[in-house]
Image (spheres, rainbow, N blue to C red):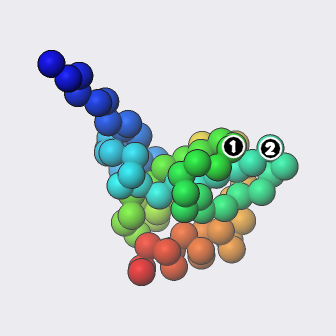
Amino acid sequence: MAKLKKTPMRQCIGCHENKEKKELIRIVKTNTGEIFVDKSNKSNGRGAYLCNDINCLEKAIRSKALNRSLKIEVPEEILHELEDSMKE
């Protein structure tokens, strides 16, 4: 019998639901302090995951979960980029 492959699961920092990794948006902080949305999900650095839902982003901003997860203050321009990518 073939073994079933384990599906990678991650927790959204906004709603705290566990979902498949490919369903979530990954935000990365590199060693140099650069923060960006990781479209490939393979960039090196500290990552945080969010649902593709504007409500989850708003919860993460209000509770400062994104800042805590990345261990740095997230600039407004990154937050606007996230909002724009979720609206698409």
Mark 2 burial class by Cα count in 10 Å: few <14, some 14-19, many 20+ = few
SS at mark 2? loop
Amino acid type, residue under disc 2 in the picture: Asn
Please give the residue where the numbered disc 1 appears in the rendered image.
45
- Residue drawn 39% across and 64% down? 52
Please give the residue where the numbered disc 2 appears in the rendered image.
31
The numbered disc on residue 18 is none
The reply to whether residue 70 is visible in this rendering is: no
Number of callouts in the render?
A: 2
Nearest the viewer among 78 and 15 is: 78
Give residue 39's position: percent from left, percent from top: 54, 62
The reply to whether residue 22 is visible in this rendering is: yes
Would residue 40 be found to the left or right of residue 86 on screen?
right
- Residue drawn 35% across and 55% down? 23
Q: Residue furthest top?
A: 1
Nearest the viewer among 37 and 58 is: 37
Marks 1 and 2 in Cβ contact (< 8 Å): yes
Examine the image and state in which quarter residue 59 appears: bottom left
Question: Is residue 63 depicted above or below 79 in this figure?
Answer: above
Question: Is residue 83 depicted above or below 30 in this figure?
Answer: below
- Residue drawn 66% across and 61% down? 36
Q: Which numbered disc, 1 or 2, marks the residue that appears first in the sequence?
A: 2
Amino acid type, residue under disc 1 in the picture: Gly
Nearest the viewer among 28 and 83 is: 28
Q: Gap between marks 1 and 2, in whole Å?
A: 6 Å
Give residue 48's position: percent from left, percent from top: 55, 47
Mark 1 burial class by Cα count in 10 Å: few <14, some 14-19, many 20+ = some
Q: Residue furthest front?
A: 1
